[in-house]
Every structure is written in structure tokens, then in C-alpha cells.
Amino acid sequence: WVFHKRYRAFWERVFPPEEAALLLGITIGARGILPRFMKEACIRAGVYHIVVVSGQNMSLIVGLGVSFLLLFQVQRRHAIWICFIPIVFYTAAVGGDPPVVRAAVMALVGLFTAAFGRDIPRYYPLLLAAGWILLWEPEALLGASFQLSFGATLSILAILPLWEIRKSGGDRWKRLLKEVALMGVVVHIGIWPLLVYYFHRLSFGGFVANWTIFPLSGVLMVLGLSIGTWGVLAPTTVPAILLQIVHVAVLATLTLITRMAAWRWVVQPIVPPSFKVIGLYYGFLFGILFIIRRRKIHENSRPRL
């Protein structure tokens, strides 16, 4: 908590209020301090998830942590164990919202299994995260934060593997672009009834944001968190050029969000569906996924001549 307060104070002292609020939202999920117009712009542009700590934050911390340790000739297995420390510390500093806990538990389970050289099970980390949250806070099940976070993650785990993407070396960039596009479609398939129920509208800006704002928010996450931590430990020694780089990235992100939110077609107002309609939709979706999965298992089990 001391780190959290000093981290916020550093960026609020360096940047104007609006820019500091956006950077703090991206790096530590402090979306409560976002101005109302900025929160509305994020919702319209379909990028409100970038100001919520999620799997992107954890994956960046783990990826950068392991890569940094490998540069110093630390064994990969030891590097994975060491990355437990920043994940736990970051989770404690950010707070205990359901998306944070979900991402942290899944990251820790993934690190634990990877450290022993095992394949990471697809659904176990998600189920463990949900069980842990509901054990301490059962009422979280009825909250929008829990439902949207777990709904989006479950959609990716259940629907995305149904599309077979060839992993040929020559088509690497083509495969990456296809994965990004499919991920946006998959998340919308999985949670659009919940989005409409809670926000009374559906944003189509997320499809564009996956190619623009979302990658830029990842860059901001890395720069903001690393330089902000430096600022917490020794604020007077942070070079001005690094602060200027972060400032430019924040302004670019804010400009993209406001311009995308201003597009007339980016949001479509929709009457919220009833619980019965939502239940029928998810029942129908589950049935389709079950049939497709059974068919794929049956095809794969056939002996090939």
C-alpha cells in the first residue's frame, strides 16, 4: 500500500491530472480516479479493459522478468520461481478486485506448472481463480467485474482453439494478425450480452483497438511501471528523457481513445436483454460448442489410412 501511494504520487506530480489518471489506470488499474469524460470515452471506444489489471499485465511482468533474468545467465527454471515475487507484490499493491485476483492466480498456476516442465492445463487455473475469489467474496459472482473478466477469459479458452491456425514459419505475421482478429471476435461472442446488460450499448471499437490502442497500452504498461518504480525508489534520479517518452506515449493513447470514441458508428445503443434471453443465448452457445468439440474429438480419434 505504501508503494501504491508513492507510485501514484510520483506520476501525479510529473504529469497533468488527465494523463496521470490514464497512465495509473493502465499500470495499476486505478480506474476510480479517471475523469468521467475519459471513462465514457474508454467505454465508447471499447477499451475500458485496458484500465483494469488483467492477464496482459501479468504476462508482461512474467515475460519481462524471465527475459531479464535469462540475460544474467539465470537458469530458466530458477527464473520462473523468482517471478513469483513480482506477481504477488504487484497483486498486493494493485488491490484485490476480481480481475486482478483472476489474472494473478492464473499466472501463478501457470508459473508453477511451467517450473516443473508440465503442460499448463487449460481450465484449471481459471477454475482455481474463481474458487479462490468466491471463497472469500461470494457476492463477487453477481458483480459486473467478475462476470466480464471470467467471461472474456473463458471465451478465449473455449472458442479460440476451435479455429485451427497453421503455425508455418513463413506465415508468422499472417498467423499473428489472424489470432488478434479472431480474439476480438471470440471475446465479443462470449460477453456481448453482459456488455449490453450492464452498459445498455455495444461498442464495435474493440475490433479496431486490438490493432492500435491495445498494443500501445502494453508499451505504456512496461514503461510506466518500470519508470514509476524507479520514481518510487529514487524520484530525483529519473532522466527527463524517459519521462518525455512516457508522456508522448500517454498523449498518443489518449488521442486515439478520444478520436475513436467520437466516431458515430462506434457504439450501438441496445435495449438490455432479460435474464431469460441471456440464459437462452448462453445455453445455445454452449450447445454449439459442445457439438463442435465432440465432432473434432471424433474426427481426431479416427484411424488414418
Image (cartoon, grey):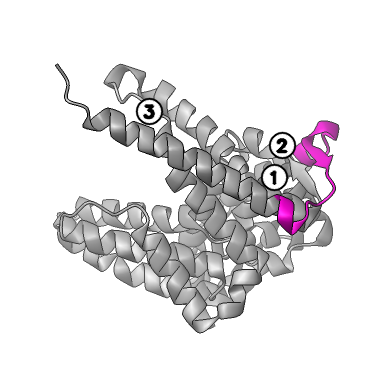
Crowdedness near tag 1: few (<14), some (14–19) or many (≥20) residues, C-alpha within 10 Å? many
> Picture quarter containing residue 107?
bottom left
Crowdedness near tag 2: few (<14), some (14–19) or many (≥20) residues, C-alpha within 10 Å? some
> Picture quarter containing residue 124?
bottom left
Mark 3 vs 1: CB contact within 8 A:
no
Res. 236 in view: no
The type of residue carrying mark 3 is Glu
Depth order, front residue of 148/271: 271
The type of residue carrying mark 2 is Phe
Mark 1 vs 2: CB contact within 8 A:
yes
- The residues tagged by marks 1 and 2 sit, at their Cα atoms, a distance apart of 7 Å
At horizontal 75% and vertical 43% (from top left) the residue drawn is: 202
Q: Secondary structure at mark 2?
A: loop
What's the mark number on residue 164? 3
- What residue span does the magenta drawing correspond to? 260-277
x then y, percent, for residue 80: 24, 61
